[in-house]
Amino acid sequence: MDNPVCISQYFTNKQNVRSFGNIIKLNILNNENEESFNKFLLQDENLVSDMTPDLLNILSSLRINLKNKSKLDFKNYFPFDEVPDLHPINKECILSYCWKALCEIVPKQVFGNNQNNKIFKNFVRTAIYSMKRQHFVLGKLIASWNMEISPWKGLETTNAQRILFTIILWILKYVLSSLICLNFYVTTCKLDTNENKLYYFWKHQWQSFYDKQVSKMVFTRVIQKCEPYSLGKRSKKNHSLADRRKLKLLRKDIPKLYLNLKTNNDCRPIVCYKNDSLSLSEKYKIRDRLKFLRLLTGKPPIKLENQYKTLHAKWLEANKPKLYFIKTDLSNAFGCINREKLLKILPEKHMSLQKNEKCLYMKKKFAQQYRDIITELRKPILIRAGSTVYEWKEGLVQGYKYSPALSELYYTYLDELYFAEHLKNSENQVKLFIRVVDDYLYITDSLEDASSFLDALSNYRNVNFDKTEVNFQHESIKYSENIFFLGYCYNTSTMQVSRANNIYAGQMCYKIAFTSGFSVLPKFIESRIGQSGIPINSHIFNLNYNNEELIWRHIFTTFCLSSNKFCTIMAVICNELEMKNYLSLYKKRVTVKLSNSIIEMLMKNKPNDFIFVYCINHFRYLAWKALYLCAKLTPKCSGLVPYINHELAKCNCIFGKWREHARRIDTNGECERKAIKEVCRRTDLRLIFKDFDVLPDGFQCYHHKCLL
């Protein structure tokens, strides 16, 4: 009962579920022997023996209702909206339809009163509005169930709770999930920044869209039907039963093709492999081959922040010349890979690796791994769309285990070919070339060189010019003073770096994975709000190119990110009475450890002649201020505000009443330096901090009504 359960997994991406018989064996419902149904539902003979006559009658009514109401696969409960275009369905409508069906299927006697009925409706709402792989503790939710009324009062409390838990879970798992997945297709999409949000589409509309996309891929020869695996009914009759079973088992191991919907009804094909079907030795082989492919690429793993730091230093030495930025990306990077060319690149790279390697053992190992990779590439890439199997013919497919590594090898080779001049480092020129997967950023101090780079880009046929941006006038490319790249915003005039607002835009609950790990809530919170959940790096917290005002804004934004995550987790998982117990975790992970990490990063990344003057209470004040703003705007967390105000008052040395305190604290928690009033109440900091009375633009605090 205390183990987290995930209901959304039973109705997400269930495209091939066609009838109720695919979910429950109908002979269990048709069998007049009630005992077999009771055992199937409760999964425990001891629980069956503890059932009272009232509960047995309720389960009998549930079986009969389910048998009668499921004849049309529940389609009579869902009036179709006559809109030809594919679009997400309002979840409140789905809740209304599902609740109407459940009221007719689940006997009212199971609740006993209206209060229990409302609790059950809350379970249904939670399941429908849940996120991808969201877990919740069902036992905790039923704790408020009234057990003092019929049909529960005749049972021992522990047994009654176990039976109730099992019945509720079964209804959510088999009945509610069937109502949803037989009438809707539920999946995640790339329609906005909400990564884990689930969207509901009418099943037949999605199937029509899916079939059109598959037909389009067949027509453009991206995929080709694989006849041995796609025998028709007449052809199957000519094969023995053993052969047909073998073929069916082979087809099950072939990964399914999914479509990830994007804006304007565009989509990205993705295949999903079953990792649990791989043995441990196979996983080790894949890992070794991926390492080998990275060696063949020959590209050193240099961090973006280190490359930019070097560029900035050269820019200062050159007396801050005008820099020209070009940001672009490649559309369908995996699908546009020429596999024949890739098979020519591999032996060339392998020969180069063998020449540079002196160890005989490693030479033999590389030769074997090379043969394995070539053998793997010559195998057909099979995918399954419904019951039909296709071979992927054009490039590589996203989701294939070797696609990222092979893509990196392929595009690194072409970059060296097309951008040979732009990759050369010159002492007299300030420039930087970066490619991460399919995203490019090129910075140069020469307009002619920038134009040359744009010309070289035309060697690729899949450049996405709609997303290409430059900071100089060009007749056909979008101009922007701020260039966004990999979650960062670059001010091309000042060379300052900030977080891109899409990192925190949208509902935070859709950016947090509520996995089964939240059963140990303190560890779950620590991993989400601390440094492991909010990376602190030298790209943002760098006083070499970011001024002090911008640094303090980054500090406040970082604390707001952490605070928003904390309040969202509290609102989704905890009740209002227990929230205050976790404030000590926030104090430990954010106001202390996260603050120390930021200070340490700033001390490492500043000019030698620059003194960063601060008081430790400045950081603590901003951390509590961010939590105050988030708690105030998160309805379920408003009860935390008085406790936060108390902590704010203790560390408010910049605006509040003056008290003697430590400006810096050593690792043992002892006072290292006493606070100086002039430092704590710096006039310039007071002006900056006055802007921190509202959350940064784009922040959205959790509000359950905003999810409707």
Image: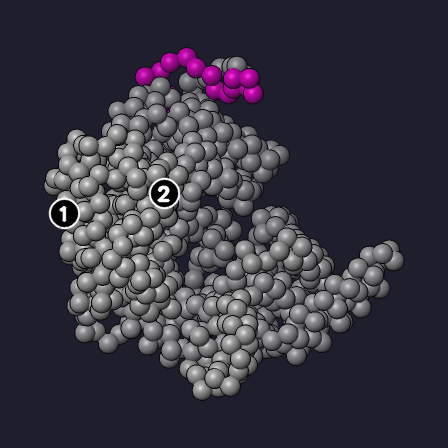
Q: Amino acid at mark 2?
A: Asp
Q: Position of residue 497 (x, y in %)?
A: 49, 48
Q: Position of residue 525 (x, y in %)?
A: 42, 35
Density class for disc 1 (Cα within 10 Å; few <14, some 14-19, many ≥20) is some
550 is higher (above) or lower (below) than 353: above
Q: Is residue 359 magenta?
A: no
Q: Position of residue 350 (x, y in %)?
A: 77, 67
149 is higher (above) or lower (below) than 383: above
Give the labeled residue for mark 2.
44
Who's the residue at 17% across and 67% down the image? 76
Element at label 1: helix
Who's the residue at 75% across and 68% down the image? 371
Q: Which quadrant holds residue 549?
A: top left
Residue placed furthest toward the left? 114
Q: Amino acid at mark 1?
A: Lys
Magenta region, main secondary structure: loop
Q: Is residue 665 magenta?
A: yes
Which sits earlier in the primary sequence, circle 1 or circle 2? 2
Give the labeled residue for mark 1.
108
From which residue to which does the magenta span run? 652-669
Residue placed furthest toward the front? 33
Who's the residue at 35% across and 19% down the image? 650
Task: Please name whichever residue, 577 or 312, is drawn nearer the observer in this view of the structure.
Answer: 577
Task: Please name whichever residue, 52 or 102, is drawn nearer the observer in this view of the structure.
Answer: 52
Q: Is residue 62 left or right of residue 340?
A: left
Q: Is residue 544 left or right of residue 288?
A: left
Density class for disc 2 (Cα within 10 Å; few <14, some 14-19, many ≥20) is few
Verify CB contact (< 8 Å) between mark 1 and mark 2: no
Residue placed furthest toward the top? 660
Element at label 2: loop
Q: How many numbered tags mark residues here?
A: 2
Q: Is residue 312 left or right of residue 329?
A: right
